[in-house]
Image: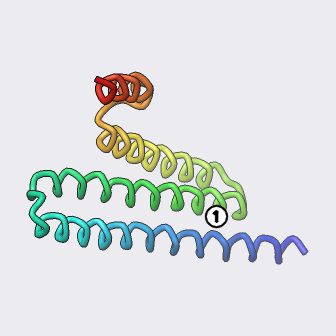
């Protein structure tokens, strides 16, 4: 029974890895298509580029979150050793840093400054 549960969890982790990779690839393709369409529509390439970077970052960020989940599932179903736990910690640390960096790049501010930025933007739109 335990072996079946481990096999199922391992299979789910592999599926989640594939979905994460597909989300990243799909995000790249979709962001590229929107970029070209926006640039050719006459809105200008500079604003289209800014939206492209933001859309691309969101796709990568979502894919990374799925990959972290898959890594966690794969690690907890494998025999736990100091090496496997250390490897998981390293992977999660690196991917969390990448996610944090991407989110900061997309939003244009630190995550703890987001509420103040949104409040300032609301004040600007009321004027």
Q: x%, y% of residue 80? A: 70, 55
The quadrant in which residue 32 appears is bottom left
- Left or right: where does residue 56 sit relative to residue 3? left
Q: Residue at x 33, y 26 (%)?
A: 126
58 and 124: which is toward the camera: 124
Q: Quadrant of the N terminus?
A: bottom right
Q: x%, y% of residue 34? A: 25, 67
- Left or right: where does residue 34 sit relative to residue 102? left
Q: Residue at x 51, y 48 (%)?
A: 92
* Residue farthest toward the right in the current orientation of the protein: 1
Taking 2 as reference, is 126 above or below it?
Answer: above
Q: Quadrant of the C terminus?
A: top left
107 and 89: which is toward the camera: 107
Q: x%, y% of residue 79? A: 72, 61
The quadrant in which residue 114 appears is top left
* Residue farthest toward the front in the current orientation of the protein: 127
Q: Which color scheme did the rendering employ for the protein?
A: rainbow
Q: x%, y% of residue 117? A: 36, 26
Taking 125 as reference, is 58 above or below it?
Answer: below
The quadrant in which residue 55 appears is bottom left
Q: Under tag 1, what secondary structure?
A: helix
- Image mark count: 1
Q: Residue at x 38, y 54 (%)?
A: 58
Q: Residue at x 29, y 41 (%)?
A: 105
Query: Circle 1: is it few (<14), some (14-19), or many (20+) Cα within 10 Å?
Result: many
Residue picked out by circle 1: 74
46 and 24: which is toward the camera: 46
């Amino acid at each position: 029974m335990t072996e079946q549960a481990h096999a199922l969890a391992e299979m789910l982790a592999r599926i989640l890895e594939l979905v994460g990779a597909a989300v990243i690839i799909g995000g790249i393709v979709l962001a590229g298509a929107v970029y070209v369409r926006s640039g050719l529509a006459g809105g200008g390439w500079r604003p289209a580029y800014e939206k492209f970077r933001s859309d691309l970052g969101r796709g990568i960020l979502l894919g990374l979150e799925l990959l972290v989940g898959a890594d966690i599932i794969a690690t907890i179903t494998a025999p736990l050793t100091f090496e496997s736990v250390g490897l998981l910690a390293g992977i999660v640390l690196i991917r969390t840093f990448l996610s944090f960096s991407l989110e900061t790049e997309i939003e244009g501010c630190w995550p703890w400054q987001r509420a103040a930025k949104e409040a300032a933007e609301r004040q600007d739109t009321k004027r």
